[in-house]
Amino acid sequence: MCATAHPHRALAGNRGGFAIEHLAANARRDLWHAAALALFSRQRLSDVLKVKWSDISDGLISVRQGKTGKWLWIPVHRRPAAIFAELPRDSVYG
């Protein structure tokens, strides 16, 4: 059976690369922005949605995890860095 008949099989063999590219190309931009930050920071979406512009500095994202309460400083991957560059800064949230 071909991979297109069962997309989940294609994802399993590609480590999610296909899913990320599909989301980047087809999702609403605001959803892609939130999902990309969650994917590339490996943080829960609920934690990512609380990130403010003031939490991003010197190539790091400061995140306080809701589950553990721990503060983390996560390096900004090149992909989210490109996304941050295209976002308007008309809100305190990134």
Image (spheres, rainbow, N blue to C red):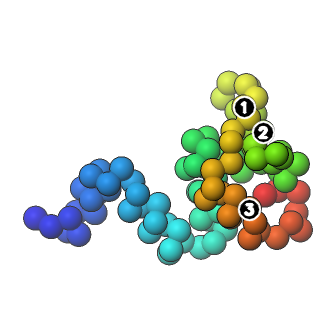
Tags 3 and 1 touching, CB below 8 Å: no
Tags 3 and 2 touching, CB below 8 Å: no
Percent x, y for residue 69?
Answer: 74, 26
**Pick the front one: 40 or 67:** 40
Residue 90 visible in the picture = yes
**Pick the front one: 47 or 20:** 20
Residue located at (72% from left, 31% from top): 72
- When asked about the image quadrant of residue 32, the answer is bottom right
Classify mark 2: residues with Cα within 10 Å, few (<14), some (14-19) or many (20+): some
Percent x, y for residue 64?
Answer: 75, 34
Classify mark 3: residues with Cα within 10 Å, few (<14), some (14-19) or many (20+): some
Q: Which is more N-terminal, label 1 or label 3?
A: 1
Q: Which residue type does callout 3 highlight?
A: Phe
- In the picture, measured across the screen, residue 6 lies left or right of residue 91, that is left
Q: Which residue type does callout 2 highlight?
A: Ser
Percent x, y for residue 52?
Answer: 83, 50
The residue that label 1 is drawn on is: 72
Percent x, y for residue 19?
Answer: 41, 61
Tags 2 and 1 touching, CB below 8 Å: yes
In the rendered image, the vertical position of residue 20 relative to residue 60, given as above or below = below
Residue located at (76% from left, 47% from top): 59
**Residue most extreme to the left:** 1
Quadrant containing the C terminus in the rendered view: bottom right
The residue that label 3 is drawn on is: 84
The residue that label 2 is drawn on is: 62
Residue located at (78% from left, 39% from top): 62
Classify mark 1: residues with Cα within 10 Å, few (<14), some (14-19) or many (20+): few
- In the picture, measured across the screen, residue 9 lies left or right of residue 55, that is left
- When asked about the image quadrant of residue 61, the answer is top right
